[in-house]
Amino acid sequence: MPSQQLIRTNCVGAAWFEYITVAATSTVFVIHGRSRDHSQVVMAEMCRVEKRGRVYLITLTGTDEHRLNPALLDAIRSALAGVRSDAAASGGSAALVVAAEGKFFSNGFDLAWARVSPSDRVPLMVSALQRIIADLLSFPMPTIAAVTGHAAAAGCFLALSHDYVVMRTDRGFLYMSEIDIGVPITENIMAVLRAKIADPRTRRDLLLRGKRMTAAEATARGLVDRSVGGAAETVEAAVAMGEELAARNWDGEVYASIRKGAFREACRGIGVAVEEDEAEMKKAASKL
């Protein structure tokens, strides 16, 4: 087994990561989370980041439902910050893939955790997720969700917030469950959903009917870019797509700027600063 060298430790919120170089060609971040409940501190590995060639792969670890509570959300944001930092230091173009272990990509917010104190905890989860979506919409490289299991409610929203979606065909569905469980969708999240679900009928079926869409149907409706066999094949296909995109050698900051312009309403709704025309022209001139 190749040797591992701990480079540094960093943190965002309640999460921290160990930055490890494995041999000379790959990098792994092990993301840990810390949550406090009923006077107990629980610490566990939350997600892992690998670098495969020019593709960063974030994997939500474990076989649970990957419920989005502040600990996991902070861990994901730490992973994104680590990828952004490493990519800036490494130079060159790259791509990002986000996947998960187990039968769930994410089953949405941690409602059991939130019910202890809804007025305090729900806003914490929503704001933490919004920060992650803002990170994705301003990320300086193409982003791909490898939907390796069920993606429901906030988990579905997280998947659709990527530039591309690859989904497994043998298990899992996209499901916005809010209409079924009686939970409203905030306007800033709805702004992103309007941008990402362009077809009104598909938007209606997903949001107002609570339709559970398989990979085949989601692909036919344009929500998913590619559907493949099982979880491993889905990750492989997403990484291959990432390599193809990274091979275009795009400027990451230009890519992020164009994305923000293409999804201006979504970016403004979620809190991402969008440059005005004059600033964009000055930036364009500086690239010539």
Image (cartoon, rainbow, N blue to C red):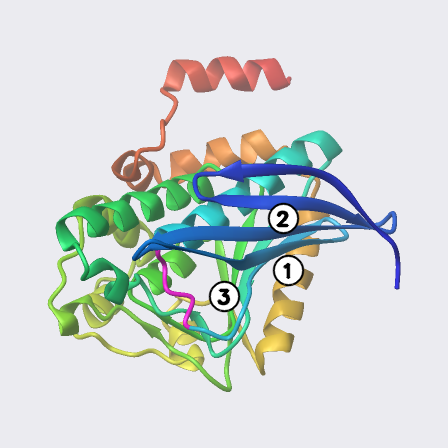
Residue 171's disc is none
Residue 241's disc is 1
SS under mark 2: strand
Up/down of 199 relative to 54, above or below: below
Residue plotted at (64% across, 17% down): 288
Q: Are marks 2 and 1 in contact (CB under 8 Å)?
A: yes
Residue 183, image quadrant: bottom left
Q: Nearer the viewer, residue 4 or 239?
A: 4
Identify residue for label 3: 225
Residue plotted at (43% across, 80% down): 172
| Of pointers 1 and 3, the one earlier in the residue sequence | 3
SS under mark 3: loop
- Tell me residue 93's x, y (percent): 69, 39
| Of pointers 2 and 1, the one earlier in the residue sequence | 2
Amino acid type indicated by mark 2? Ala
In the picture, measured across the screen, residue 87 lies left or right of residue 68, that is right
Residue plotted at (52% across, 43% down): 78
| Of pointers 3 and 2, the one earlier in the residue sequence | 2
Specify the farthest residue to the front: 39
Residue 95's disc is 2
Residue 140, image quadrant: top right
* Start-end of magenta stretch: 65-69
- Tell me residue 149's x, y (percent): 47, 75
Q: CA distance from mark 1 to mark 3?
A: 10 Å
- Tell me residue 76's x, y (percent): 49, 50
Residue plotted at (48% across, 38% down): 12
- Tell me residue 184's x, y (percent): 13, 58
Amino acid type indicated by mark 1? Met
What secondary structure is the magenta-colored segment mainly? loop
Q: CA distance from mark 3 to mark 2?
A: 16 Å
Magenta stretch encompasses residue 67: yes
Amino acid type indicated by mark 3? Asp
